[in-house]
């Protein structure tokens, strides 16, 4: 009987309303090939629609979060052939994921792996993790948002130093730059990410979605428009049962019970 190949992405449910996705290509340091991209897109799309899930953690293993894209997939392709892969369609379910997303980074997070981490809302990194966007050393550039997200995360001058050299930097340095939200001792990133995810998942889902929407879409607009956008989202939450429950619980000095409606 032929053994089935291992799944490129594993899913766990380690805590109430929390999903954990693990990239599962340890033999290739979790390099992101088409199978991984497709599996991530499918799982993120499904989790976006799953009412039982309020927060997602994505990780790799202790040696690598994801050590870049699969170079063998791209090495001999022309620009038209790369465009024909339409890789942006596989990134879209992650980019548009409406719920809180946490990246737990141990080991290498390079190239597409670093870009994947930067799609998250929170990055928890081991102090010994290795981040980097080394595409320039291969004669190319980041192509899944790396130039745009890194500049927005750490500012032009720090980002250009890293983008133009392709140098790696540690999880501790990522935290200093403001890329990593928190830094942990080696081996502690996943556990800390799950603690945060559990804390977040206990909060009202509609409010969480609105906060993420305002925080991500607001900076793309002029300040007046962004403030109006925030105000509309704020006002809309007063039509939810969770708002009534949260405020009543506060007044009554009890713990709220949020239902996501």
Image (spheres, helix red, strand yellow):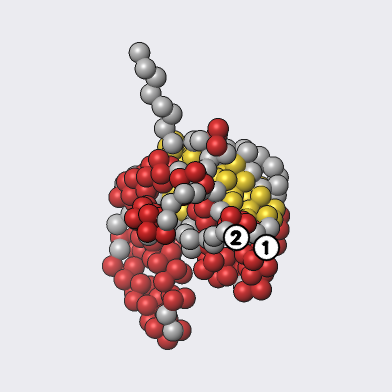
Q: Where 176 falls versus 22 (above or below)?
A: below
| Mark 2 residue element | helix
Name the spot of residue 244 as percent of width and height, x first. 34, 63
Question: Which dot marks residue 165?
Answer: 1
User: What residue do we see at 37% from left, 59% from top?
Assistant: 80
x then y, percent, for residue 14: 47, 37
User: For mark 2, what is the residue?
Assistant: 136
Near mark 1 (Cα within 10 A), the count class, few <14, some 14-19 or many ≥20, is: some
- Image vertical order of residue 99 relative to residue 17, above or below: below
Q: Residue at x 57, y 45 (%)?
A: 67
Residue at 52% from the left image edge and 56% from the top image edge: 115
Q: Earlier in the sequence, mark 1 or mark 2?
A: 2
Query: Is residue 129 at all visible to an observer of this figure?
Result: yes
Image coordinates for residue 170, horizontal then vertical, percent: 70, 53
Decide: marks 1, 2 in contact (CB < 8 A)?
Answer: yes
- Location of residue 94 (image quadrant): bottom left
């Amino acid at each position: 009987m032929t053994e089935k190949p291992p799944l490129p992405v594993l899913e766990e449910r380690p805590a109430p309303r929390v999903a954990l996705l693990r990239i599962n290509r340890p033999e290739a340091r979790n390099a992101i090939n088409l199978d991984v991209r497709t599996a991530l897109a499918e799982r993120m799309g499904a989790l976006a629609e799953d009412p039982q899930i309020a927060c997602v953690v994505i990780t790799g293993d202790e040696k690598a979060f994801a050590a870049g894209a699969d170079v063998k997939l791209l090495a001999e392709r022309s620009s038209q052939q790369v465009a024909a892969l339409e890789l942006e369609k596989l990134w879209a379910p992650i980019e548009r994921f409406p719920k809180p997303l946490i990246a737990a980074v141990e080991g290498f997070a390079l190239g597409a792996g670093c870009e994947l981490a930067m799609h998250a809302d929170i990055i928890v990194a081991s102090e010994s993790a290795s981040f980097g966007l080394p595409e320039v050393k291969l004669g190319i550039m980041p192509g899944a948002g790396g130039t745009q997200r890194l500049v927005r995360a750490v500012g032009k001058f720090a980002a250009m130093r890293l983008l133009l050299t392709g140098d790696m930097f540690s999880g501790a340095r990522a935290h200093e730059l403001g890329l990593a939200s928190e830094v942990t001792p080696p081996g502690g990133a996943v556990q800390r990410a799950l603690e945060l995810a559990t804390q977040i998942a206990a909060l009202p889902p509609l409010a969480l979605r609105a906060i993420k929407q305002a925080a991500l879409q607001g900076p793309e607009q002029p300040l007046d428009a962004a403030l109006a956008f925030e105000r509309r989202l704020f006002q809309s939450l007063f039509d939810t049962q969770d708002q009534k429950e949260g405020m009543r619980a506060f007044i009554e000095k009890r713990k709220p019970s949020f239902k996501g409606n």
